[in-house]
Amino acid sequence: MTELSGRRAVVTGGASGIGEACARAFAAAGAHVVIADLDAAAAERVAGELGGEAWAVDLSDTAALAELSLDADLLVNNAGIQHVRPIEDFEPERFSLIMRLMLESPFLLIRAALPGMYERGFGRVINISSVHGLRASPFKSAYVAAKHGLEGLSKVTALEGGPHGVTSNCINPGYVRTPLVERQVADQARVHGIPESEVLPKIMLTESAVKRLVEPAEVASLALWLAGPDAGMVTGASYTMDGGWSAR
């Protein structure tokens, strides 16, 4: 595939999970990929395998991103963390961290990339949101708030970018088979008072009509289409990939 030949793609959280799957799909389609990740060694590994670049960066350090200029035709805002606590026990500093990483840094990266996209008359902003950008779950106040905010940011980017050839969309998966989800199992078991073996059937997959986790490659396949030439009229949209969760 060469449909992304000549394009430069920046993928945050690109060293594992959904981000790595997106980077691999983009590279296979001909793009030059920049793997942005907190884990420098993992970013170097993936970038080396794909002939791309590694960008070791702490995206929660938003002050360092304020004056950034970003050369990207394709920007995938994917980096994220999770923290499961009732609101009354949710640590304020953890709430702030999640908001910086998952809402403020996407804003700053979009802000840094748009001037170049506008100059070239082309850009694709792909925000890896979640079904939690459209629906809420208990004990995830920061994550749900950040993803809801990302949905709004994506739509504003679509409206401002449209006249300049820039599209902006969200992908909204349910639970994806990633390290982020695997780390949630113990937290969910503790907060709900159930064994870890019961978390998938009783908590994570209860709302989904299709009773399995989403695979990272499935998310990447949609991101690849959104990045390509056939999606020029697709903008301001939110694409659910949640096994029917949001159909309820």
Image (cartoon, grey):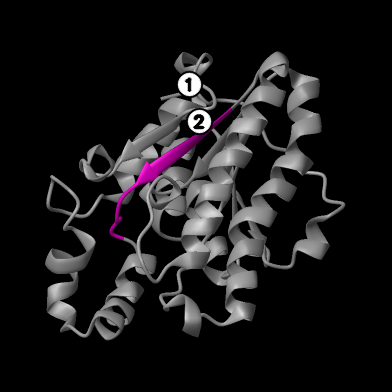
Q: Secondary structure at mark 2?
A: loop
**Which image quarter is the C terminus in?**
top left
What secondary structure is the stretch in magenta mostly built from? strand
10 Å crowding of disc 1: few (<14), some (14-19), many (20+): some
- Residue depicted at x 14% and y 67%: 202
Quadrant of residue 71 in the image? top right
**Would residue 16 be found to the left or right of residue 80 on screen?**
left
Give the residue type that dot 2 points to: Gly
Towards the viewer: 41 or 86: 86
Q: Is residue 176 magenta?
A: yes
Towards the viewer: 70 or 241: 241
Towards the viewer: 186 or 194: 194
Residue range in magenta is 168-177
Of callouts 1 and 2, which one flags the residue occurring earlier in the amino acid sequence?
A: 1
Quadrant of residue 16 in the image? bottom left
Which residue is disc 2 drawn over?
Answer: 30
Q: Secondary structure at mark 1?
A: loop
Q: Position of residue 199 (x, y in %)?
A: 19, 72
Give the residue type that dot 1 points to: Glu
Which residue is disc 1 drawn over?
Answer: 3
